Amino acid sequence: MKRTLFILLRNPLSALGLFLVALVVLSAVFADFIAPFPTHAGAVVDFANFNKPPEWPYVFGTDLVGRDLFSRILYAYRISLLLGVVVLVVAVPIGVTIGLVAGYLGGWTEYVLMRITDVFLSIPPLVLAMSMMGLLQPTLTNGMLAVTAMWWPWYTRLVYNLARSEKEEGYVLAAEVIGASKAHVIFREILPNCVPSIVTKMTLDLGFVILIASSLSFLGLGVQPPTPDLGSMVADGAKYLPDSWWLTVFPGLAILVAVFGFNLVGDALRDVLGTGQ
Amino acid sequence: MTAPTLAIRDLTLGFRGWAGQVDVLHGISLHIMKGERVALVGESGSGKSVTARIVLGLLQQLKTARIGGLVAFEGQDLSTLSARQRHALRGTRMSMIFQDPTSSLNPVYRIGSQFHEVLKRAEPGISAADARRKAQAALADVAIPDPARALDSYSFQLSGGMNQRVMIAMALANEPSLLIADEPGTALDVTVQAQTLSLMRALVEKHHTSVLFISHNLGVVREFADRVYVIYKGRIVEHGRSADLFADPRHPYTRALLSAVPRITGGGIPEIDDVSESYFAPMVVHEGCGEPGEVG
């Protein structure tokens, strides 16, 4: 762990990634203390200061009803990170378990599980998420559900392939010979050897989940107002380009910073953990 | 007379695939008495390793495998046992060591915790401290200089020879009555292989463990085994005590196999037919080596 951190910090790109990720996470966690106008995360109207370009005390400007954009971006990070973490926490165990079972057991189990996975993979991810959101109420929980539904098959694919190669390793046969159960072989022998790849993919994916969630809100299918969301902030401001540029540019930059940061860290982890695919 | 540790009679094996059945074993018979070291020698693909897997009960789970004949372990017919009972034998009454010791150990766990898993098979409630004590003693038995340090290491931190000795210690930790050694140490260099084999020999002698030794290395077999079965294309072609068989190979295939051993005195490898009609000649049994119940 210490060694990993050391190697990460030595490379300027991954150090930048770590810095950006830390920035995003810290601003989300401490939004209550950093935000100059914490109440602006909710339904507040201040027509005296609406649509103002960046100037003190509104460092990123204000939106169309006079709310501080900087404060709203901090709170939007909170929602995005929450969504990203919840989606991965739910999707990864599902995808990983199915992939491990299919890869190790083989035969009919593999056939059925992998064809189901293929069906999910064959639908364009955003379309799947959009149709789910169309059917359900556009709330944060349903947004998580929709993104989770499109996310787990990728982990199944990844882990399935890993499990197929790991099960040929000597230690799997050795475990079978000493009488280890199937569950033991799958979760105690094979899974730990897949963890580096899974962690790398999770780090990379955190950025993409935020991006997809933003796309959904951009289309009006994500988190609903007045809850701040980076995607819907960009969407709302797009109508007023290029005059009120701060309405779109700052939320857009915020998305960029988060996705870029997680990607850099993910790439660096892939190099450090040696899980190049 | 007590039942042999392992008795195989007319064992046949075929794999059923899309293109019909492929026969792998055509009725082989062999037996191992208690404390005896028996080698099964043959070229790649002759059926050595599948025989070992049937004995361990691993192939019986495979739906495409068609197994016939009798495999009896300590007088018990394996086919009459349930999968659960066969499972209970593995790791406790019989165990196995493999070609490549380093890949047989999971790289994400320390040796100590893998040893703990092995000991748990025989004694499910064993405490970590007891397991560690037992593991240390077992590692000391296989001449590992600093057992405590080895237990805290990962497999990739130890040398191949150390890993092989760890595997031997693990395989013998639960005092199995049968040890199957599938080309042990083929992945190691020759001097290390010789050391570990003499170590293994001393240990199995001490514990009266029966060994089924699977190999294509005739020099090693000659040193290690009491009796030798030569297998060719799923049939046993010759059976005799090591000394007799090596001094007086009678089956054409055995002769071909022995002459294929490279010699340090030079002369190169002689021209040997890959397949010859004579290799299918009837089985040759040396004096006093019949299967129990047949010749005695």
Image (cartoon, coloured by chain):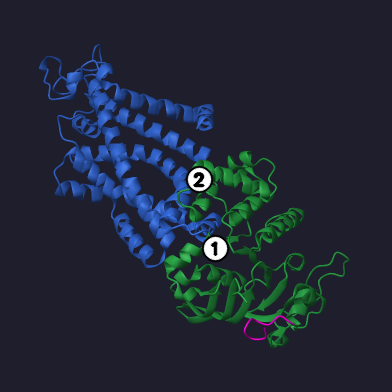
Looking at the image, residue B53 lies above or below residue A94: below
Q: Quadrant of the C terminus of chain B?
A: bottom right
Q: Main secondary structure of the magenta part?
A: loop
Q: CA distance from mark 2 to mark 1?
A: 42 Å
Residue found at the far front of this picture: B1
Q: Residue at x 48, y 37 (%)?
A: A269
- Assess whether residue B292 is covered by the magenta stretch: yes
Instruction: Identify whether B118 is placed above or below A6.
Output: below
What chain does badge 1 belong to? B
- What label does residue B93 carry, if any? 1
Q: How many marks?
A: 2
Residue A92's x, y, as percent?
35, 46
Range shown magenta: B288-296
In the rendered image, the residue lying farthest to the top is A56
The residue tagged with tag 2: helix, strand or loop?
Answer: loop
Chain ID, green in image: B
Q: Which residue is mark 2?
A: A276
Q: Residues within 10 Å of mark 2 (few under 14, many from 20)?
A: few
Callout 2: chain? A
What residue lies at 47% left-to-right and 27% top-to-bottom? A15
Residue drawn at point x = 24 percent, y = 50 percent: A127
Q: Are marks 2 and 1 on the same chain?
A: no
> Which picture quadrant has residue B227?
bottom right
Left or right placement of residue A78 versus residue A201 in this view: left
